[in-house]
Amino acid sequence: MVNDVKNMTTDMENWDETVEEIERLLRKVSSIVFRRGREILSNFSITPPQFNALLVLIRADEKLTMGELCQHLYLASSTVTDLVDRLEASDLVRRVRDPNDRRAIRLEVQEKGEDIFKQVMAARRAYLSSVLEKEDPADRAQLRASLSDLFLLIEEEERIRD
Amino acid sequence: MVNDVKNMTTDMENWDETVEEIERLLRKVSSIVFRRGREILSNFSITPPQFNALLVLIRADEKLTMGELCQHLYLASSTVTDLVDRLEASDLVRRVRDPNDRRAIRLEVQEKGEDIFKQVMAARRAYLSSVLEKEDPADRAQLRASLSDLFLLIEEEERIRD
């Protein structure tokens, strides 16, 4: 009994330490990759919020409305209007009428938008390549599997919460 | 020879796919954890940039100057002045004179700042706990090891670049 309690306490301490360490590692890795992402963007004529909007529009299954883009970006309507105005002025995106609902406006990514997106993603991957090529192939496969598991668990948690 | 070239091509394709997938997983995981982090902060009377500043000040080995805080946050001096003004108005941080250099001002985290920081970190860990407890202990240990390896490699890359 004494031993059980002792083991439980030890397990609980390890659990706290494990969670703390994984939280720290995720935060540090995200923060450095995020900063490098910003540096990459600074070489292109697009701001970080504009790039996020472009990414959402490109990854969407269909042309989004302004309202849908707001939801995806978790930003206020007025902020997203400004963002889209600038993306349109730079010929990256344009507003088009929905053929099925003439009153609705949808956002279409222009060729220049697709190009800049591809270039930014290639630069991000080049950065990550230079990091990952130093890793042992087996460790790299393990990293991929672990991140994939984590992503599934996090997505599951999102479904529970929403 | 033909086989060699073929194998090389196959390896290169796998490599691109691996990098692309790890980039995608890291981006997705970071983005969801980041969003949950923002949601957690919305329950506290502190904005995300204020919290980042508080985190830097708490994690620093000594009391930072305004200039040092600017460097850590990658923000302009005027922005950081505003941030610190608000942190000071909320009694989270205060400006103190450096005892070794009477002309220098350093930033000291107040008890209320420490408290809010602890509460936010506890909420972040509670969120991550609810995700990680669904994972098999061996997989969790592997995730931790993989993230730790990745962090070391990313840090090494930072040293090369800076």
Image (tube, coloured by chain):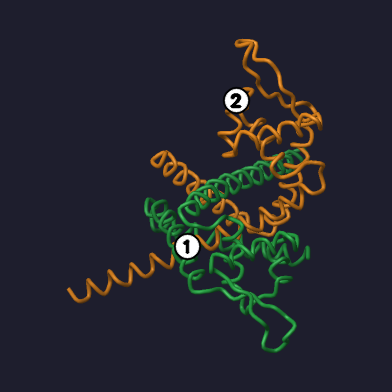
Chain colours: A green, B orange
Tell me if B28 is positioned left or right of A5 in this view. Answer: left
Which three-letter amino acid code belongs to the residue tagged 2? Answer: Asp
Give the percent coordinates (x, y) of residue A69. Answer: 68, 68
The quadrant of the image that shows the C terminus of chain B is top left
Q: Of discs 1 and 2, which sits in the foreground?
A: 1
How would you rate the neighbour count of disc 2 (Cα within 10 Å): few for under 14, some for 14-19, many for 20 or more?
A: few
Q: Is A1 situated above or below B22?
A: above
Note whether A108 is above or below A99 in the view shown: above
Query: Label 2 is found on which chain of the structure?
Result: B
Q: Which corner quadrant of the image does residue B51 belong to?
A: top right
- SS state under label 1: helix
- Distance (Cα) linking label 1 and label 2: 36 Å
Q: Is residue B15 left or right of residue B148?
A: left
Dot 1: few (<14), some (14–19), or many (≥20) neighbours within 10 Å?
some
Query: Residue beneath label 2, please?
Result: B61
The residue closer to the viewer here, B31 or A89, is: A89
Q: Circle 1 sits on which residue?
A: A121
Kindly identify the residue that appears in the image at 57 percent across and 71 percent down: A93
- Residue A42 location, x and y as percent? 49, 51
Instruction: Out of A80 and A1, give the one closest to the viewer.
Output: A80
x then y, percent, for residue B38: 73, 51
- The front one of A134 and B132 is A134
As drawn, which residue projects farthest toward the left? B1
User: How many numbered discs sit on the rendered protein?
Assistant: 2
Q: Residue drawn 72% across and 54% down?
A: B36
Q: Which quadrant of the view contains residue B46?
A: top right
Q: Quadrant of the N terminus of chain B?
A: bottom left
- The chain identifier of the residue carrying mark 1 reads A
Three-letter code, disc 1: Met
Seen as rendered, the residue at the extreme bottom is A100
Is A150 located above or below residue A67 in the figure? Answer: above
